[in-house]
Amino acid sequence: MNLLTSILRTLVPSLWGSFITWLILLLPALAPLQDQLLGLANVLLPIITAVIVGAWYAFWRWLEPRLPDWLIRAVLGSAKAPTYLGKHTAGLVTVIPGNITITNAGEMVPDGDLRARMERVARQTPRA
């Protein structure tokens, strides 16, 4: 479900931003500059679109706590923000008598293997 939510919350603001860019290009005030703008379209259009998409997303994320769910769905694609578990998060480790450990991922690991894993991770983790 997080994958679908994250895709929607990327795709929908991108579509809105592209639509707004298209509307801006239709403004009558830009008609006299049309030839110059078309010459720069290959360079400027992707940049302008990216800026508008970013501004759209930032604006609606800022307003999100104050809006009803239906409006958030319309402008951001989903009323629920995706949540991610980090690869290197500190998790709960439960030790069960009998030398078995259950990690936060829910896997059962013999204690000796867990210690070796933790040492490997410690060696691979970059230090600041």
Image: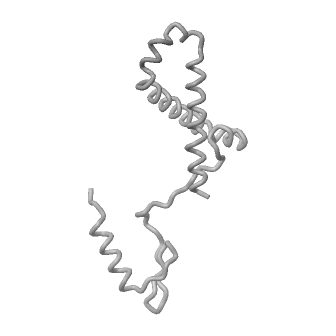
Q: Residue at x 65, y 46 (%)?
A: 78
Residue 36 locus on image (x, y percent): 44, 12
Q: Quadrant of residue 62?
A: top right
Instruction: Residue at 49% x, 61% y: name it.
Output: 85
Q: Is residue 60 left or right of residue 107?
A: right
In this rendering, the answer to whether 86 lies above or below 74 is below
Determine the image quadrant of residue 17: top right
Please name whichever residue, 114 or 5, is drawn nearer the observer in this view of the structure. 5
Q: Return the x and y of residue 77 as percentages of the image width and height.
A: 64, 43
Question: Where does the image place residue 30, in percent across and percent down from the top left?
Answer: 54, 12
Which quadrant of the rendered structure holds the C terminus?
Answer: bottom left
Does 57 appear above or below 86?
A: above
Q: Residue at x 66, y 41 (%)?
A: 72
Quadrant where the image shows the N terminus: bottom right
User: Which quadrant holds residue 21?
Assistant: top right
Counting the numbered discs, the total is 0
Nearest the viewer among 60 and 47 is 47
In screen coordinates, is 95 left or right of 6?
Answer: left
Residue 29 at x, y percent in the picture? 56, 9
Residue 123, compared with residue 68, is above or below; it is: below
Q: Residue at x 60, y 53 (%)?
A: 4
